[in-house]
Image (cartoon, coloured by chain):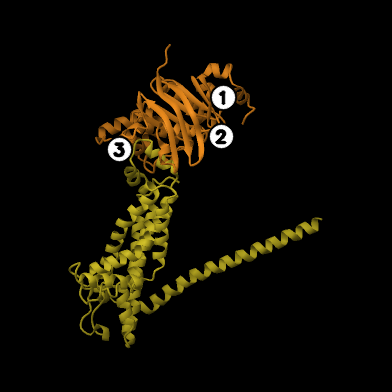
Amino acid sequence: MENHTHIRVRELSVYYGREQALKNISVDIPEKRITAIIGPSGCGKTTLLKSFNRLIDSIDGVRVSGEISMNGDNIFNPKIDVTLLRKKMGLLSQRPHPLPMSIYDNVAYGPRIHGIRKKRKLDQIVEHYLKESSLWEEVRDRLHTPASGLSVGQQQRLCLARGLAVEPEIILGDEPTSALDPTASQRIEEKFLQLKARYTIVVVTHILRQAVRLADYVVFLYLGELIEHGPAEEVFKSPKKELTQGYIKGVIV
Amino acid sequence: MSRKGSSKVNTRKVEEQFFKTLMIIATLIIISTLGVILLTVIMKGLPALSLSMITQTPKGGYYLGKEGGILNAIIGSLYLAGGATVLAILISLPIVMYFNIYAPKKSLFVSACRFSLDVLWGVPSIVFGAFGFTIMLFFGLRASLLGGIIAVALLVLPVMSRAMDEVVKMIPRDLLEASFSLGATRLQTAAKVVVRQALPGILTAVLVAFGRGIGDAASVIFTAGFTDSIPTSILRPAATLPLAIFFQLGTPFPEVQDRAYASALVLTAVILIISILSRVLAKSFTKHVVK
């Protein structure tokens, strides 16, 4: 089966002031697969992820060289509309951050921003995506209560529904289960495995076993450098580089 | 060994108790000051307070102890402080949003602005009054409600914007990113997420500013003037409660001086009522705040 490339990264370097966070990264993220970005803390995993939706733009003193293209368009092209770019990607962050509004309004926030006003249409969207993230049954009777009243696990699924509601092509997860208990984590992982049929998923994780469970494709970063990347099976079973072997065995932390 | 240990624990306990007592005393001083002020105003003001005082404007000879009331000052103060607060909100919100959402994090310009606001915060209100008066003279304006509103808005702007700034600063970066990552612009994020999340703090800032504005005499003495009638136009002079208190207290007649305390009671009640009302109203808007 042939994999199409969804996100193409070429010679990407990112600097925070004088510090170089990413060094000359080139990698292809396959479409409709789960790609896990692994590596020890501070290796640039999150920087790479946040480069994809240009959230790194808002960091002070950030400089970027190289190219990231999605469907052939360079995302650093100054002519590109960042809001449209971000609309194509749903982000799940380390801790769920529900917006200060009701459950309903959280899911409807994105669609409303992008111009959907009709109540009936919004109702449909909210129901659909809450079902999609398996939250509907738990919240259908309290859609208009504050989202902050949900448990952390529920909040993360709400954030997933909120991200899906803008109809992205890609789901980005920045250690999306790190604040969750094992059961809640498992539900998110199950969701990812279902969603990869329709979305390209990129997950940053420091939990190796999670990467093994989820990933089709693995990108291993170490101190801002891309050490190894390839299909999950190859990387985990027969890593080519010593650093990767060490990390997988748990020598490098 | 064990004795030594226990004696050490003992001194630490005494130390702890000593400072705790100091803290309680400090707290009691504040509370009792408030209590004594309220008590004085109520005890001296309540007997002199009458319905006619809050429903009538001063008749001839009011300041000599004759008929009339301070409705002119009550209405004038509400107009003035209300107008100034609204004006200050309209200026503060953009400042705060620029500081925290638009400007780069370590912007020198923003630091300079914050510093200027802090300095302005400390500027005495009479200076704002004198400044406003100079500007009005330059433009050939007379003392008016508008002049007062502008002077008081400038007076409360630093308090309001810095208080809002501190709350908005506390909003986690990730919450903003959650909104950005859905494709929201900064303006949408500011209007729909930041304002909601910071609403309790914004409200406090507004109330503090309103309280300072309605209670200030020095900034309005030249700019808003004083009149015995209720202002009918924004270009007419307006009476204010602090000045009404000042004028009444300055007369040699004890019964008029008592009315000053009654006026102070009215001023305190106005502030109290508005604070409580807005908190009750805001409760329904702040339930969504993410803790």
Q: Mark 2 packing: few (<14 Cα in 10 Å), some, or many (20+)? A: some
Which residue is more in the foreground, B44 or A64? A64
Q: Position of residue A244 (x, y in %)?
A: 59, 23
As drawn, A106 above or below B92: above
| Tag 2 residue | A41
Distance of label 1 from label 3 (alpha carbons) = 37 Å
**Which of marks 2 and 3 precedes in the sequence?**
2
**Which of marks 2 and 1 precedes in the sequence?**
2
Q: Mark 3 packing: few (<14 Cα in 10 Å), some, or many (20+)? A: some
Looking at the picture, do discs 3 and 2 lie on one chain? yes
A210 relative position to A165: left or right: right
The residue under the point 26% across, 86% down is B64
Q: Position of residue B87 (x, y in %)?
A: 28, 60
| Tag 3 residue | A113
Q: What color is chain A drawn in?
A: orange
Which residue is more in the foreground, B209 or A149? B209
Disc 3 marks a residue whose amino acid type is Ile
Res B214 → quadrant? bottom left
Q: What color is chain B drawn in?
A: yellow
Disc 2 marks a residue whose amino acid type is Ser
**Numbered label attached to residue A209:** 1
Disc 1 marks a residue whose amino acid type is Arg
State yes or no: discs 1 and 3 in contact (Cβ < 8 Å).
no
